[in-house]
Image (cartoon, rainbow, N blue to C red):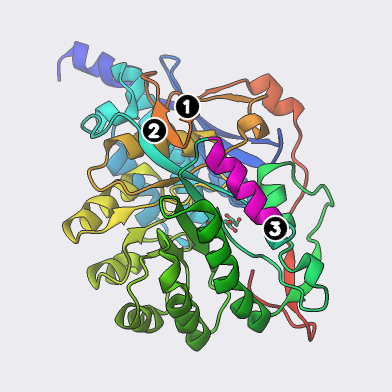
Amino acid sequence: MDDRVVERRKLMSITSVSTILTSPGRNYLLVVVKTDDGLVGYGDATLNGRERAVATVVEDSIRQLLVDEDESRIEYLWRKIYLSAYWRGGPVLMTALAGIDMALWDIKGKRAGLPLYSLLGGKARDRARAYVHVHGQTTSQLVERSRAKVDAGFEALRFSFDSVDPRDPSVTYCQAHQDVAVGRIERTGGAARRDSWDSDTYLTDLPRTAATLRDTLGPNVALIHDVHSRLSPPRAVRAAKELESTGLFFLEDPAEHLDLSTLETIRAQTSVPIAVGELYFHGSDIAELVRRQLVDYVRVDISHFGGITPVVKLAHFAEALGIRTAFHGPSDISPPAHAALAHLAVHLGNFGIQEMVEDQSIWSEVFTTPIQLDRGFITVGNQPGLGVSVDEAAARRHEFVPASLPILHDRMGAIHPW
Ligand code: GCO
Ligand code: MG
């Protein structure tokens, strides 16, 4: 190598890897990677309720694998972090790896002066359809709020019931979690207990509520329902069959994500489009679900599946099998993740739909993003890399507050899966 090449390589090395825990409206964990010529990359590594565990892995184990390495070799560095540990993967490590991966792509884009979508091959579309959550304490509130969103221009809405109380019909659909998702976190310091899950009530009310929504909103609104894997296999099949006439855009997580045989039964007995994926961490684990075409939409979480690098590989694999994307985009992942998803949404050939946070004031005191959400469609700006800027001083002012998902119980006081 001549001296110029040596000099150039030296300029491209990673000098620091750190984390910022911040809580402008929810808790977020950012990974910050810096190079010796002053570039800064940001990635999201938020694992809802386990943020500090991920921060420890990044600071204590991963940092030493990256310092002095060439920041441009994302594929090599991803494999170095993933394969160098004998005990691979799992939610904490894959979230940490995702944060690093996003930060490295951010740096790659900034070095090239190109937005992520352009690095990946450019835009396949000008704008991408998004869906947002709608929630209500009662069916009539849910319907009323859905109507308002459609009137405001949204064409795709997702509803989900996170507790069902058969003892009090006036709060049949208590959706406090979803209110939290679009608003501020419950600053309780711990997890709230909910004693209100009842699968039979849910199963009776779900088709009725879905039909009411369809009647009110008309045939053209894309309706999505998230079962959140809360049903046993036969109940999951029954729910899918009973929802068939509603014409859902897709039914999400009707069964446990690893229960391929129930998903196969649902497919054999209904024509309801299915979306699964947010609980997978590894390409090798989700490969069979995709290969057997048990889903129509694959929806891994970019922040828990190891970042942009493996998500792009999965999307290409799915494309070959006629499966589209509907990646997980809840409010519990931070703007670098949402920005990466927006870049993928305009780039990927097999993009389907993108879950999106409607109220972005939840993070706006700390983050500026390149994403515009206009009447249910996402557009993304041409800033280099992910295009997210972070006010680090503001991030540090909004201190982390311990918070957790509610702990769901059934009416006998037993734990029910969240
Ligand atoms: C979704 C998800 C969320 C999860 C949340 C857990 O489809 O958006 O299921 O609602 O509950 O991400 O932290
Ligand atoms: Mg979901």
Left or right side of 24 for 192: right
Amino acid type, label 3: Ser
Which residue is under mark 1?
A: 372
Say which residue appears at 36% left-offset and 43% top-offset.
308
| Above or below 43: residue 202 | below
Residue 177 appears in the picture as rendered: yes
Q: Magenta stretch: residue 193 in it?
A: no
On residue 104, which mark appears? Answer: 2
* Gap between marks 3 and 2 measured at Cα: 46 Å
Range of magenta residues: 141-152
Number of labelled discs? Answer: 3
Label 3 secondary element: helix
Residue visible at 54% across and 69% down in the picture: 227
> In the rendered structure, which amino acid carries the disc numbered 2?
Leu
Question: Residue 104: percent from the left, percent from the top?
Answer: 39, 33
Tell whether label 2 touches label 1 (CB within 8 Å).
no
